Image (spheres, rainbow, N blue to C red):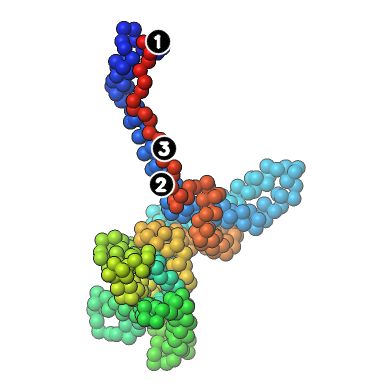
Amino acid sequence: MSAPDQEPGLDPGTAEELEQERAREAGGPVGDGAVDTADRLAKALHQTMSSPWTVSVGAVLLAIVAGSIMIAFTDEEVKAAATYFFARPTDTFVALGQAIGGAYSALFRGSVVNLRAEDFATAIHPLTQTLNYATPLIAAGLGVALAFRAGLFNIGGQGQMLVAAAAAGWVGFGVSGVPFPLHLLMALVAGMAAGALWAGLAGLLKARTGAHEVIVTIMLNYVAFYLISYLLATPGLLQAPGSSNPKTPPTAESAQLPPLVGDRFNLHWGFVLALLAVVFVWWLLSRSSTGFAFRAVGENPRAARVAGIDTGRATVNAMLVAGGLVGLAGASQVLGGVTTGFSSDIDAGIGFDAITVALLGGSNPWGVLAAGILFGAFKAGGSTMQASQGIPSDIVLVVQSLIVLFIAAPPLVRAIFRLPDPNRRRAPKKKANRNRKEAAA
């Protein structure tokens, strides 16, 4: 008995070959080709949905939703409309839309582009502010991320930034008679070297004595803070001559990072240095034997030791490089951000924000770049949101804290968005049987 779509006069095998030939001419996959295509698409979708990047995006979305709820609860018009919600519910929803939409539009206007500006320079000023805030976050985030990849938890960014700022600042205002490029280079090298040595001390104690780097770096933060405070309050050291305030003299013009897009904007060449640092860390981790040693020690120190890698040396080297990157952040603050003289609050919380940036970026240099720009946008747009909408700037800090919370709990994010677990293997699908039974004559 023949199939319904079989042409008369043809046996079943010939009819099937003719059907496949027609499907190929039509351009569509047939048989196992269609199954393989669908399987590849499903595998690609599974890999995308289970990647750490998807979890990071989900964490940001959840934090924004939580921030929207807090904005709604703190808005006076929303609270007033909620009192007669059952009489006119549309008023409450309109107030919610205006409060939340106005807040995030102000955040966009203050961090990306101001569409209400009269000229182009004023319109892009928010973007330059975002990149300016992102510059030290990217550099410090790279230092924390590199340590993470080596299995080290570097939370000493504050201390490393402080000693780097002190060294770069001292060269910047204490050395005279040196022309512009050389003076700037000397100050940058001094800052990075100071940060590297401060972090390398924690790495050396970890490698030689087994001291936990978390405890050591926390204690070094306090040591650096009080040491710099003493130097700033002592005449003849870092304190400006003739001043009783704990503040340094201004940085010499020959040691300042020049503006990147003109004198009207605060963005300086430190952002370019941060981008170069991103490329350097990517090359170091992905294309060099030193980076391979860092990653091997971070994955499994015992296996790395068996493979012939000197884990102690790798630990010290990783902390040296990480401290140098954080030192670049401190130096850029002194040589480009605050050139009129700095005090003990020069780190501005960047040392701890760098931990969030590294976590959100998945300890990947390109992810750190994106996360640093995102947090720079939060910093730049928070003041505009507060000024134009009357929303407390602490809402932005809460959103950043929630991002850390959700990043630290990937199973929670996967459960909310129903994302697959990357550690769970997919059940293999049975392939279609290629040998089909011939129809009975």
Let me know if residue 356 appears in the view: yes
Disc nearest the viewer among 2 and 3: 3
Residue 143 screen position, x and y as percent: 37, 69
Residue designated by label 1: 1
Query: Where residue 47 is drawn, which disc sits there?
Result: 2
Q: Secondary structure at mark 3?
A: loop
Task: Identify which residue is drawn at 72% across, 42% down.
Answer: 88
State the CA–CA distance, disc 2 to disc 1.
46 Å
Disc 1 marks a residue whose amino acid type is Met
Residue 78 screen position, x and y as percent: 67, 52
Task: Identify which residue is drawn at 57% across, 52% down.
Answer: 65
Screen quadrant of the N terminus: top left
Disc 2 marks a residue whose amino acid type is Gln
Mark 1 surroundings: few (<14), some (14-19) or many (≥20) residues within 10 A: few
The numbered mark, 1 or 3, whose residue comes first in the sequence reads: 1
The numbered mark, 2 or 1, whose residue comes first in the sequence reads: 1
Residue designated by label 3: 429
Q: Secondary structure at mark 1?
A: loop
The numbered mark, 2 or 3, whose residue comes first in the sequence reads: 2
Q: In this orientation, which residue lies closer to the viewer: 251 or 158?
A: 158
Above-or-below relation of 51 to 146: above
Screen quadrant of the C terminus: top left
Residue 34, by quadrant, is top left
Q: Is residue 284 left or right of residue 232?
A: left
State the CA–CA distance, disc 1 to disc 3.
32 Å
